[in-house]
Amino acid sequence: MIGGPPGAARGASGDERLWRLLAGAVRVALVLVGLGPVWVPLAADLPGLSVVAHLLDGWYEFQCHRDPGRTIQLGALDLAVCTRCAGIYFGLGLGALALQPRLGAWPLRAWVAGAALLMVLDVATESVGLRPAWAPLRLATGLLLAYPVGVAVVLAARGADSG
């Protein structure tokens, strides 16, 4: 299991409440950011939310190429990021929401390494023309890579053996 918060005494109720609050905030943030590719375009013109949507959209613009040919649509809505990035964000959010499976360090590393290898194979086989671009595979490799990370980040914020 992931190690507990540094210096936190297990019996200290004040420390436990603080770590639970931190874990809850991390969880909510990951879920909101994970769903960001969907809600950011919807909230761009809503009073109050438009500022937050604009800030997150600025991050998306910085980190994603946003090629329209590689961006999926939900109905008439263009997502805020490309398909692979959407998979990564959705994976982080879903992992934070589900909090399962609770993996130890080595199984977590093996999962992430295996998913990264699949993603590299996806990119490589498409780049050399062995197959055409396929949005479901891009989405799946992003989800597979980020899902266990979302779980691990929230569990790490909670500390070891926290329910």
Image (spheres, rainbow, N blue to C red):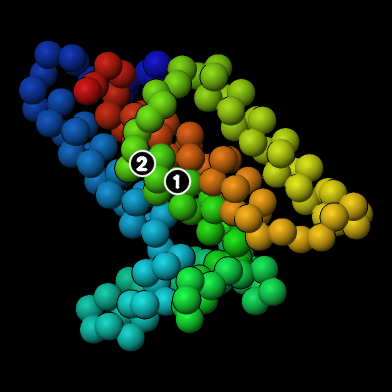
What amino acid type is highlighted by mark number 1? Leu
What residue lies at 41% left-to-right and 63% top-to-bottom? 36
Q: Can I make out residue 151 in this image?
A: yes
Q: Quadrant of residue 115?
A: top right
Considering only vertical position in the picture, is 11 above or below 37?
Answer: above
In the rendered view of the protein, which quadrant contains the N terminus? top left
Local crowd size for mark 2, using a 10 Å CA cut-off: few (<14), some (14–19), many (≥20): many
Per the image, the residue denoted by label 2 is: 96
Per the image, the residue denoted by label 1 is: 92
In the rendered view of the protein, which quadrant contains the C terminus? top left
Residue 28 place in picture, x, y as percent = 27, 49
What amino acid type is highlighted by mark number 2? Ala
Viewer-proximal residue among 64 and 146: 146
Viewer-proximal residue among 27 and 129: 129
User: Is the Cβ of the residue at disc 1 closer than 8 Å to that at disc 2?
Assistant: yes
Query: Is 132 positioned to the left or the right of 75 in the image?
Result: right
Query: Is 11 positioned to the left or the right of 98 in the image?
Result: left
Residue 98 place in picture, x, y as percent = 34, 38
